[in-house]
Amino acid sequence: MIYLDYAATTPMSGQALAIYGKAAKSAFGNSNSLHDIGGTSSQLLESSRRTIVKLINGDEKGLFFTGSGSEANILSIQSLLNGLDDSKKHLITSQIEHSSLYHLFKKLEREGYKVTYLIPNKQGHIEINQVEKALRDDTGLVSIQHGNSEIGVVQNIKKIGALLKQKDIVFHSDCVQTFGKLPIDVEEFGLDAISISSHKIYGPKGIGAAYIKPSTFWNPVIPGTTHESGFRPGTVDVPAVAAFAIASMEICGKMDENMNHYEQLRRILIDSFAPHQKLITIINDSQHCSLPNIIPLQIKGIEGQYVMLECNRYGYAVSTGSACQVGMQEPSRTLLSIGYTKQIAKQYIRISLGTETTHEQIENFAKVLINVVKDFYK
């Protein structure tokens, strides 16, 4: 089976696996315990924290480990809202946020917050003037994702951050899909908080992180929590944190090399599908402001679910969208937001590339997909 669903999750790298096994044996203690075994875990936890936070130019006091990127999103927003003045009841986000955030904001609306959902343009971009026009005197927080997992569009969070910094409005960004693929500098980008995840960058599942700038005020979701400076309850999985740190160093160290690799593979697909544009269309095929490792396709007249299953039958693992929404029969909210009808939005599959994806695999996959589509129309 050739895996082409790296935006959903990645296999652990050899180095991450090695450090995980080593840490599980030598740093198994509770990092909050005062004995020496706990001290060993605590030292590894803090060195891992320093390793990761340097990669985003942050302060180690602001990085908190969570159980996932989704949990980092939810705890970040809720903790930041707990720290806002009660008069700041207006929030801004976008229609194309990850489901963990989108549904959290829907919940917050039911609790009395007013939420503005910005609608992207046809390429999936949120324009700075949209953000500016949506701001109100009672706006307390803005959350705009950095990179979209379904169409790969990258938002200009640096420009948004500069605007919000002038207005003294808290800015959070879901950086789960971009951490390790694009440079992230929380200071340069004017970010107060971000969310990242380990299993998107060849680290273990079940571990993510939230970064909140130490100068940004927040209050814990669960009062009295002792772990992670009160940010999240529960004993920290130190071996997973150590593996996360190693995976982060690896991926960020090869960022340019990997991006060039993805761009080459993407070009192979674009060239392969060019003679078949009436049947296979690359959504958002401009490489400008998009992640090259995510290639969204519309297979005209054929539901993505069918195409995905046929690809699986031929030995290729692709997806029909965000893994957090698989199983739902509704079409992608992202595609609907950029103007696709429900019928056309269901004709979508996503190819996502990894560091181990080869030119030969992509060339062969393109041939298989073309044949699957042609066979359907015979």
Image: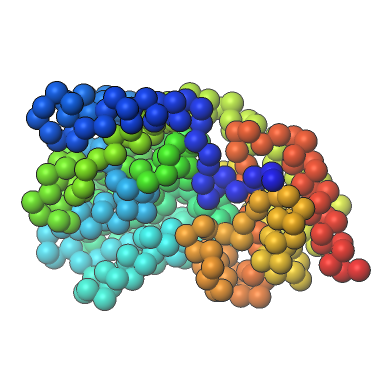
- Quadrant of the frame with the C terminus: bottom right
Q: Is residue 224 left or right of residue 266?
A: left
292 left or right of 170 in image = right
- Percent position of residue 28, x then y: 26, 32
* Drawn side of residue 203 relative to residue 270, left or right: left
Q: Is residue 60 visible?
A: no
Quadrant of the image occupied by residue 116: bottom left
Nearest the viewer among 127 and 278 is 278
| Residue located at (68% from left, 65% from top) | 304
Residue 294 placed where, x, y %? 60, 47
Task: From the viewer's side, name the closer residue of 144 and 73.
Answer: 73
* 319 over 21 or under it: above or below: below
Q: Residue sitting at 53 percent across and 64 percent down?
A: 326
In the orientation shown, which residue stands out farthest toward the front? 25
Total marks shown come to: 0
Corner quadrant of residue 353: top right
- Colouring convention used in this rendered image of the protein: rainbow
For the point 83% across and 55% down, the residue is: 370
Q: Position of residue 276 (x, y in %)?
A: 84, 56
In the image, residue 64 sits, relative to residue 336, either above or below, namely above
Q: Position of residue 41 (x, y in %)?
A: 23, 28
- Work out whether 234 lies above or below 251: below
The structure residue drawn at horizontal position 62% and vertical position 74%, both measured from the top left corner, is 341
Residue 325's place in the image compared with 232, above or below, is below
Compared across the picture, whether 159 is left or right of 349 comes to: left
Residue 74 is at least partly visible in this image: yes
